[in-house]
């Protein structure tokens, strides 16, 4: 992203102290302290989040927007307060109206393709995606393409995993949508979202951003990013599973038809039709994930207390340490995908190690208590571009420290010996 | 908790390092079938020649982890030159050894509690020869799909040829 935090030489948070807030990180696997390096898939939850959800369930729970009794009113107030809190966290100009709670980020992106796409896209219209998109920002557009004959166009990447923008104007020419990830879940690449948004808007396209990997790891300001719609997921930002977020520019959301139909999303239902509700409830058919929203709100409070600037500075320092440690120890035996500079990327480190299959790497690492992901990371077009079927991926978060990276290096060394 | 030695037996590592029957037969006349593991993106290509009720020749191509590659290699060595009814029987026995039905397995990277290996009496492990080395895979449920990929692909090939199941 264009608005990078400058690197600092000293991490400005103490990861080992923060790690004590996360009960799971105290457990052992195969007799060793767990080294959790898969936060890009799902992060662990601090006690503050777990407690907030439990406290809500034990003291306040009732369905929202329905009852007039005290706890129902309280539940509604707390649910809506969580919404506003999430909106404020990402710099939404109208936090109470622009945050839509979904099941996950995938549903948020499907909502966009379904509600916006079906309203605005016709045969021959162009949707531009990057080669590094997650399947969640590809397949909904493929489905729309199959249904109404829209054209998908691709922004390529270079060998360092950066977008190639030389031909940007031509690629965007006539485009109606630019779908772009803020930070690649495979390469760690931070994309120049503000620059791309400006170019897309100049071409008349709407910008749909996948912020699943960026919102948990660096300060986010939707206005500075200039995007129109932005999706992310609670469970990658210290919150619970079962709830995702779609932020949309107020005027754009107001112009959209509903997504799913049912209760909550209506103002009136008659035998001859219905009147949709105001935003954001228009897009939240049925009982929403209430406890999860409380948990997400608590996760936002936790990240606020640590400070996103500090999180970013910590992760730049730790990513730099990891890139250095892996390169120093393994040299040409390891191929790390994505930009070589820590400042240009997040703490997602995908790699190929000798000719050992990522599955086998992950299996051996598990024996050492080290949790890394192996697979295509729901980015098969990117895998094809990289010329691999799968990668191993270690991903860092605010609770990881240099000790975790050292454990990864030692376990990888053991995997190398095992398959020698 | 199962150890790595249950998974990575010496025979498995040997077949991984020196896979047997690698490559592709000319197709046609050989039947060519592709298999995919959506969990890890692994791809396997099985080409087979069926002549006079016998699996006359088989070759394996594609990429995958040590378990999928060694299982494919072991399979090719076990079925090559065998009458088709014996091949079908071996497939059934092998899949029986893999004990839990794949349809009940998570297909998207989710884990699960290790399950106990099946009782030795339940299947005729002796009939499997070297293939019995893959028995330990059952203790690592996520890896079962790696071990069965080539077998499912072979089954698909036999179905295409019209070999009775």
Image: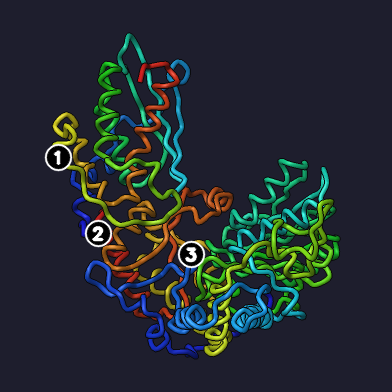
Q: Position of residue A228 (x, y in %)?
A: 77, 68
Q: Quadrant of residue A293?
A: bottom right
Contact check, label 3 and label 2, Cβ < 8 Å: no
- Label 1 near label 2: C-beta < 8 Å? no
Q: Residue at x 40, y 34 (%)?
A: B61
Query: Tell me, what colour scheme is on the image?
Result: rainbow
Residue, disc 2: A417
Residue A213: image location, x then y, percent: 57, 69
Give A287 or B11, whichever is nearer the viewer. A287
The circle on residue B120 is 1
Marks 3 and 2 sit apart, C-alpha to C-alpha, by 28 Å
x and y, in percent, of residue A185 in the image = 54, 63
Q: Nearer the viewer, mark 1 or mark 3?
A: 1
**Pointers 3 and 2 within a single chain:** yes
- Alpha-carbon span between mark 1 and mark 3: 38 Å
Q: Residue at x 64, y 78 (%)?
A: A76
Please report, as a chain letter, where disc 3 is located.
A
| Crowding near the residue tagged with mark 3, few <14, some 14–19, many ≥20 C-alpha atoms within 10 Å | some
Tell me the quadrant of the picture where the C terminus of chain A can be found. bottom left
* SS label for mark 1: helix
How far across and down, in percent of the image, does residue A344 sit? 59, 73
Q: Which residue is mark 3?
A: A41
């Amino acid at each position: 992203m264009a608005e990078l935090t400058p690197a600092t030489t000293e991490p400005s948070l103490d990861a080992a102290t923060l790690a004590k807030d996360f009960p799971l990180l105290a457990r052992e696997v195969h007799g060793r302290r767990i080294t959790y390096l898969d936060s890009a898939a799902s992060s662990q939850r601090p006690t503050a989040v777990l407690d907030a959800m439990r406290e809500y369930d034990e003291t306040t729970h009732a369905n929202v927007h329905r009852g007039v009794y005290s706890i129902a009113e309280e539940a509604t107030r707390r649910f809506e307060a969580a919404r506003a809190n999430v909106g404020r966290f990402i710099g939404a100009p109208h936090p109470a109206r622009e945050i839509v709670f979904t099941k996950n980020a995938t549903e948020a992106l499907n909502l966009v393709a379904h509600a916006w796409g079906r309203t605005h896209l016709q045969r021959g219209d162009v949707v531009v995606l990057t080669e590094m998109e997650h399947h969640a920002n590809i397949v909904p557009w493929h489905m729309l393409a199959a249904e109404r004959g829209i054209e998908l166009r691709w922004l390529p990447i270079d060998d360092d995993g950066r977008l190639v923008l030389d031909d940007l104007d031509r690629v965007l020419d006539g485009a109606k949508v630019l779908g772009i990830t803020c930070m690649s879940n495979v390469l760690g690449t931070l994309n120049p979202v503000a620059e791309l948004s400006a170019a897309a808007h100049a071409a008349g396209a709407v910008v749909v951003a996948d912020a699943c990997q960026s919102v948990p790891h660096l300060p986010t300001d939707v206005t500075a990013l200039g995007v129109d719609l932005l999706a992310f997921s609670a469970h990658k930002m210290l919150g619970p599973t079962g709830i995702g977020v779609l932020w949309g520019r107020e005027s754009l959301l107001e112009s959209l038809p509903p997504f799913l139909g049912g209760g909550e999303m209506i103002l009136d239902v008659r035998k001859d039709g219905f009147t949709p509700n105001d935003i954001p409830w228009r897009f939240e058919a049925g009982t929403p994930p209430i406890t999860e929203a409380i948990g997400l709100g608590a996760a936002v409070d936790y990240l606020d207390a640590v400070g996103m600037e500090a999180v970013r500075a910590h992760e730049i320092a730790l990513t730099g340490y990891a890139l250095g440690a892996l390169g120093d120890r393994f040299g040409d035996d390891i191929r790390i995908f994505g930009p070589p500079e820590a400042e240009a990327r997040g703490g997602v480190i995908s790699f190929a190690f000798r000719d050992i299959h990522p599955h086998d790497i992950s299996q051996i690492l598990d024996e050492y208590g080290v949790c890394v992901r192996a697979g295509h990371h729901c980015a098969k077009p990117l895998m094809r571009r990289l010329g691999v079927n799968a990668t191993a991926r270690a991903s860092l978060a605010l609770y990881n420290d240099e000790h975790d990276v050292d454990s990864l290096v030692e376990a990888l060394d053991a995997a190398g010996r095992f398959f020698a | 908790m199962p150890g790595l030695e249950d998974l990575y037996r010496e025979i498995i590592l040997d077949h991984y390092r020196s896979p047997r029957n690698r490559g592709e037969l000319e197709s046609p006349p050989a039947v060519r079938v592709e298999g995919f593991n959506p969990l890890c993106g692994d791809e396997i290509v099985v080409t087979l020649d069926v002549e006079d009720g016998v699996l006359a020749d088989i070759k394996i191509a594609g990429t995958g982890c040590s378990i999928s590659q060694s299982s494919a290699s072991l399979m090719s060595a076990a079925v090559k030159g065998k009458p088709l009814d014996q091949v079908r029987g071996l497939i059934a026995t092998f899949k029986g050894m893999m004990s839990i039905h794949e349809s009940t397995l998570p297909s998207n990277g989710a884990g699960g509690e290790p399950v106990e290996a099946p009782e030795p009496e339940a299947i005729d492990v002796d009939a499997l020869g070297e293939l019995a080395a893959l028995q330990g895979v059952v203790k690592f449920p996520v890896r079962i799909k790696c071990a069965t990929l080539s077998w499912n692909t072979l089954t698909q090939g036999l179905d295409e040829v019209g070999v009775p199941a």
